[in-house]
Image (tube, helix red, strand yellow):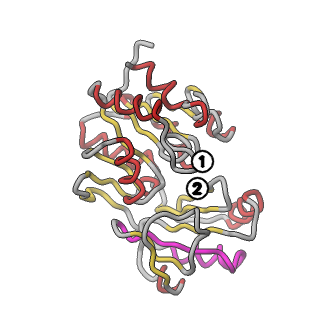
Amino acid sequence: MTWVPKLVALDVDGTIVNGDNELSDVVRDAVVAIRDAGIETVISTGRAISGVMDTAAKLGFTDGLAVASNGAVVFTYDPVEVVHSVTFDAADAVRRVLQEVPDAIVAVEQVGSGFRVNRPFPETEFAGQFVIDDVEKLIAEPVTRVVIRSTDHTPAEFTAIVHDLGLTGTNYFIGYSAWLDLAPEGVSKASGLDVVCERLGLTAADVLAVGDGNNDLEMLQWAGRGVAMGQSPDALKAVADAVTGSIDEDGLAQELTKYL
């Protein structure tokens, strides 16, 4: 392969770390080697800032640029400084989902400090600090991100409900569980990475992006080379330039070592 990226954009869950938030030595060594080779390395995730910083610490990164909240937040670290954020009015979308799934858990992001939620998430699913509040208070002001979680539906059932709602004015991503991420319309990891590239004087053609989820689709389509992890849904594999091994096979390392 003669092409070498100038920037590597990496999803976190299912790409850098597994479902238990564990990072293999093989993947860590490959990511660190890419950065040591002078290739800009950017975490690009649906996680909030605290989740990004957890991954950066696992990798031993103490400075850099990152994309959080599915592109709604771009920041530098460490210390954390938000350099770009996009908010939206999520009230209508949240109310419409709750009409169909009244017992759903709703969380809104407080950039840099955690989440406000209407009730706690399942214990193993939610990292970081949260404060419990009334739903109407949660959606009273524009926010960067909303997470809606149904514990009473299968992922397929929840996906069908969300699709049938025909949500407008938002961009949304459905996870492997019955988990819905709402973001400002037009905002995705790709739009966040556009901000990063503008700051660095790069273009999408300079970027290698690797991910495994529905919220990585725009990023993989946008990047000069988009690579799907082996366990990715078929829709993501279909838009990718290549498919690497799964998270259990250290698929990220398989892709990154091509450029070392």
Q: Position of residue 198 (x, y in %)?
A: 27, 42
Residue at mark 2: 173
Mark 2 and mark 1 in contact? Answer it, CB < 8 Å: yes
Magenta residues (range): 90-111
Residue at mark 1: 214
Q: For residue 165: magenta?
A: no
Q: Position of residue 8 (x, y in %)?
A: 38, 33
Q: Secondary structure at mark 1?
A: helix
In this picture, residue 162 sits left or right of residue 146: right
For the point 55% across and 61% down, the residue is 181
User: Where 240 sits versus 198, above or below?
Assistant: above
Q: Position of residue 102 (x, y in %)?
A: 69, 80
Q: Nearer the viewer, residue 232 or 160?
A: 232
- Where, quadrant-wise, is the C terminus in this rendering? top left
| Amino acid type, residue under disc 2 in the picture | Phe
Q: Position of residue 24 (x, y in %)?
A: 49, 37
Q: Nearer the viewer, residue 139 or 179?
A: 179
In this picture, residue 85 sits left or right of residue 28: left
User: Mark 1, residues whose alpha carbon is within 10 Å: few (<14), some, or many (≥20)?
Assistant: some
User: Where 37 sits versus 112, above or below?
Assistant: above
Q: Secondary structure at mark 2?
A: strand
Q: For residue 99: magenta?
A: yes
- Where, quadrant-wise, is the N terminus in this rendering? top left
For the point 24% across and 38% down, the residue is 200
Image quadrant where residue 257 sits: top left
| Amino acid type, residue under disc 1 in the picture | Asn
